[in-house]
Image (tube, rainbow, N blue to C red):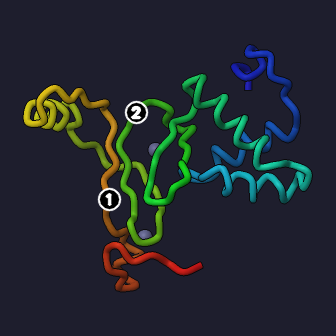
Amino acid sequence: VAKLRERGGRMTPQRLAILQALLEQEHPTVDEIYRQVSETFPTTSVATVYRTVTTLKEMGEALEIQGTDPVAHYDAHRPGPHSHLVCVSCGRVMDSPEVDMAALSSELGRKARDWRLVEQAQFFGVCPECRARGAAPGETDAE
Ligand SMILES: [Zn+2]
Ligand SMILES: [Zn+2]
């Protein structure tokens, strides 16, 4: 909040609700944040949520993650680069257990010549819930 104020952004109750939704949900998309905020502030627009999240991303306070869906997920808990597990069945995004990214990065960097990797990875798999439902990789939920 303080950092947003420093940037001259007005701290409206609506913006505060966006921050809250971003922190309460695990790797939410703009749409998921919007759905939570619009329960309290029906006049909120998706554009406002998007603008606020983009500002936070530019400030380095939120990390943008690309999952299986075309829309991005955001993590404001750990804004620094970190790895994620992405379920190819239901699309949920979780923080990955620690892996030795430096080692992985240098191995990949060595094998794929001239590629400089950023220390962040998305690992795609099937989450335990989806496996319990017997979902096969690549299968998507019809909502
Ligand atoms: Zn899943
Ligand atoms: Zn994360």
Percent across and percent down for residue 109 are 15, 31
Does 16 sit left or right of 19 as displayed? right
Circle 2: element type: loop
Percent across and percent down for residue 104 are 17, 38
Of the numbered discs in the image, which one, if any, rests on residue 81?
2
**Cα–Cα span, label 2 and label 1:** 17 Å
Does 45 sit left or right of 56 as displayed? right
Categorize mark 1 by other alpha carbons within 10 Å: few (<14), some (14-19), many (20+).
some
The residue lying furthest to the front in this view is 114
Amino acid type of the residue tagged 1 in the rendering: Phe
Name the residue at 73% across, 26% down. Answer: 1
Q: Is mark 1 within 8 Å of ligand 1?
A: no
Q: Picture quarter containing residue 82?
A: top left
Q: Which residue is mark 1?
A: 124
Name the residue at 19% across, 33% down. Answer: 105
Amino acid type of the residue tagged 2 in the rendering: Pro
